[in-house]
Image: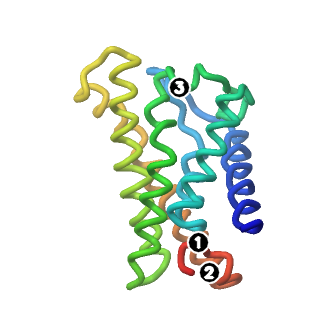
Amino acid sequence: MERGMTRIALFAALIAALGLIPSLTLAFGVPITAQSMGVMLAGAILGAKRGALAVLLFMVLVALGLPLLAGGRGGLGAFVAPTSGFFLGWPVAAFVIGLIVERLRSGPLAVTVALASIIGGILVMYGFGIVGMSIALDKTLAECAVLVTAFVPGDIVKAVLTGLIAQALARSRPAALLSRQ
């Protein structure tokens, strides 16, 4: 139990640390950050429940006002910004990624994790993000879907990197990959 809580806290810290990597903010107010890769890693390595809990812990810290989001943002404003849909989708994305990695045990781990990250970290997260952007920017869902296409190449790279990192971790420390225990 204690180790699980420690790992949840460590992945919340990892997501925060990835926010320190400079982001590129697009014209419609949504930044490209490395934090979504932290969400992918949390789900892939910790599994569905622990991965989602790590993201929820991070979100609570942001809601309390800690400037942990890319660009030093924090507070309740993060829940009503153009990025709020993506942000609210993070725990669901981590859960879906973890669930897929836990259940899909055939094939190379890197491929499984990359596929899970594409499904959870792109498709699921974009679903939330498009709805959030539509509300915040007062645009149609179709208009917002077109806007988020700018993120797809970078997120595919993050998904592949997540797969490679998970595979390397599984080779060096198999017990650390909680999603496969």
Residue carrying label 3: 79
Which residue sits at x=63%, y=77%? 168
Q: Do the residues bearing badges 2 and 1 touch, measured as CB atoms within 8 Å?
A: yes
Amino acid at the residue labelled 2: Ala
**Direction from residue 53 to residue 84 in the image, left or right:** left
Residue 79, image x, y percentages: 53, 25
Q: Which mark is residue 170?
A: 2
- Spatial CA distance of label 1 from label 3 is 30 Å
Residue 115, image x, y percentages: 39, 66
Amino acid at the residue labelled 1: Ala
Comes first in the chain, label 1 or label 3: 3
Q: Quadrant of the N terminus?
A: bottom right
- Which residue sits furthest top? 138
Question: Circle 3 sits in a helix, a strand or a loop, which is it?
Answer: helix
- 123 or 8: nearer the eye? 8
Q: Nearer the viewer, mark 2 or mark 3?
A: 3
Whether residue 111 is situated above or below residue 5 in the rendered picture: below
Q: Do the residues bearing badges 2 and 3 touch, measured as CB atoms within 8 Å?
A: no
Residue carrying label 1: 166
- 45 or 144: nearer the eye? 45
Q: Do the residues bearing badges 1 and 3 touch, measured as CB atoms within 8 Å?
A: no
